[in-house]
Image: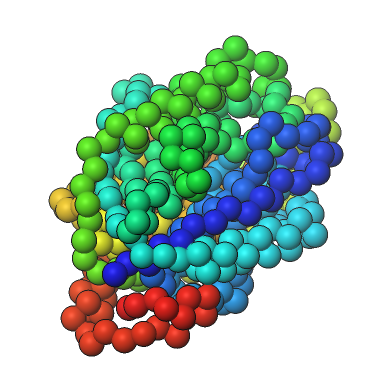
Amino acid sequence: MTMVGASVVEITPPGGGAMAGFAARLSGAQGHHDALTVRALVVDDTALVTVDVIGIDAGLSARVRARSPLPAANITIAATHTHGGPVSMPGRLSIPADPLYLQQMETAILNAIEQAADARAPARLYGGSGEEPGFAINRRHTGGPVDRGVPVMRFDRMDGPTIAHFVSYACHPVVLGADNLLWTADYPHFVRATLEDACPGSVALFATGCAGDVNTGHSAAASLSAQRQADRTYAQAQRIGEGVARSALSADMTELSGPIGSAEAFDDLRFESRESSAGADLARTWRAASRTPGDIHDIWANWAENKMGRDLDQIPARCTALHWSGARIIGLPGEIFAQTALDLRHALGDGGPVHILAYADDNPGYIPPQEEYAAGGYEVDEAHRFYGMGASIAPGVAEALSSAAQRAAETAAALATAQDCAPKKKSNMKGNQDAIT
C-alpha cells in the first residue's frame, strides 16, 4: 500500500523587495499577481518539493533535509525557476538576499514536508505523458533540441478523490520579462490553477525540466531590456500554462504498481575561466560601457573586480532519483540544457513515466553539454558573471552529472525492489505512524 500526502505553504514576500532574474529590472516588486508557494508531495518516506523561486542553494537544501521527518537522502527540492520571485540564494545573482526571507523560506519548505507527511493516506498512482503543446523553443539554435512532452502523474485516494497532480515541462518560466514588477510563478501558476480547477481539493505540483537553452521563443539578449514586449504578458503566460495543463489532463494514464525507492549520487562542479583579458582591463571596459548603476555592464565590472577567478574549488553536486512504482523522477542541479535530458532519457531506456528536472537542490548557473562550448554565447561565456560565480562551469560537467543521475536511478530502482522483497512492518516515521513500508 502506497501512502501519499501533499501540501501547499505560501512564501509570497511583501511588496518592495528585490526581484531575481533580470539584470535590466532595477525596481523592487510593487505587489503580487499570484501567490508564490512551496508545494510538497510525500510518497511513503520519499518527497518531492517545488519552490517558486529562481533557485535554492545546496546549503539550504541540506539543512532542510537534515531537519525533515523523512530520511534526508529521500528528498528532492527543486526550484521552479520563476524570474518573478525574490532573491533566494545568498551571494548569487548580483543582488543581496534578505536573510530574514531566506530563513522564512527554509522554514516554509520544512513545514510543507511535515504537513504533506502528516496528510499521507492510502493512494493509487497513475502515470502518463501528454503531447508536446508546442510552446518550448531552443533559444540558442534554430530547430535545436528540446525535451518534448508533458510527463504527468496523478495520485488518487483509495476512496476516490484526487490528492495531487505532478507535471513537468522543459521550458524556462520567463514568459514575463524585466518590465514585470509583480511577484509571480509565471506560467507554472496557470498550469497548477488549471489542474486544481479540474480536480477541486487537490494539490498541483509543477517542476521545470531541462530548459537551460529553452524558452518560449525570445533570445537571452531580449531579457536585457526593461521595455515591454508584446509577447511577454500575463495573457500569454495564461495561454501557455493552460495549454500545458490541458496536455497533462488529456494524457493516457496507466495505473502504476510496484515499490517506492530513492537514491542520491554525487559528482563535482568544476570551473574553467574563458575570459579574454585580465580582470582590471575588463572592469575598465565595462565601467565605460555602463549607463546606469546596476545595469548589466555595471554588474560585470563589479564581478571582474570582486569575483573573477576566485572560489574555483570543486563543489560537490547532488543528483537524485525517486522511483515511484515504476515512474522515475530525476533531479539535477543548475540550468541543464535539453540535450543532456535527451541523452539521459536514452541512457535510462524505456519504462514508466520519466521526469527529468533541473534546478534541483542547487542552482550554480548554466551547465552546458560539451558540444555547446564552441558556440559560446550568453549561457556559456557570460551568465556566470550574473550568477556571481568565479568562472564558467567547465566542459564535461554536464556529462558527469548525467552519469551520476543514471547511478542514482539504478540504485533507487534496486533499493525499491529490495525493500519490496523484505518482510513488511509498521514504520516509525514521524508524522505517519500508520504508514506501511
Question: Within the image, what quadrant is residue 130 found in?
Answer: top left
- State the quadrant of the N terminus: bottom left
Quadrant of the image for the C terminus? Answer: bottom left
Q: Residue at x 81, y 44 (%)?
A: 14
Task: Identify which residue is drawn at 33% across, 48% down.
Answer: 153
Based on the displayed image, in which of its 4 quarters is residue 326 positioned? Answer: bottom left
Q: Nearer the viewer, residue 207 or 203?
A: 203
Task: Name which quarter of the figure residue 252 lies in.
Answer: top left
Residue 299 appears anywhere in the view: yes
Asked if residue 148 is positioned above or below residue 208 in the image, the reply reads above
Rendering coords of residue 105 (x, y %)? 68, 58
**Nearer the observer, 219 or 112:** 112
Q: Is residue 100 left or right of residue 369?
A: right
Residue drawn at 17 percent across, 53 percent down:
351
Q: Is residue 391 left or right of residue 225?
A: left
Q: How far across and down, in percent of the image, does residue 250 sit?
A: 29, 31
Q: Provide residue 68's location: percent of width, then percent of height.
A: 56, 74
* Outermost residue toward the top in this view: 230
Residue 398 is situated, as x and y percent measured from the top left of the image, at 38, 53
**Residue 332 sits above or below residue 300 on the image:** below
Please name whichever residue, 176 or 138, is drawn nearer the observer in this view of the structure: 176
Could you tell me how many numbered marks the image carries? 0
Is residue 145 visible to the viewer in this orientation of the structure?
Answer: no
What colour scheme has been applied to the protein in the rendered image? Answer: rainbow
In this view, the residue in front, 407 or 350, is 350
Q: Residue at x 30, y 61 (%)?
A: 324
| In the image, farthest residue toward the front | 159
Compared to 40, does 422 lie above or below? Answer: below
411 sits to left or right of 15: left
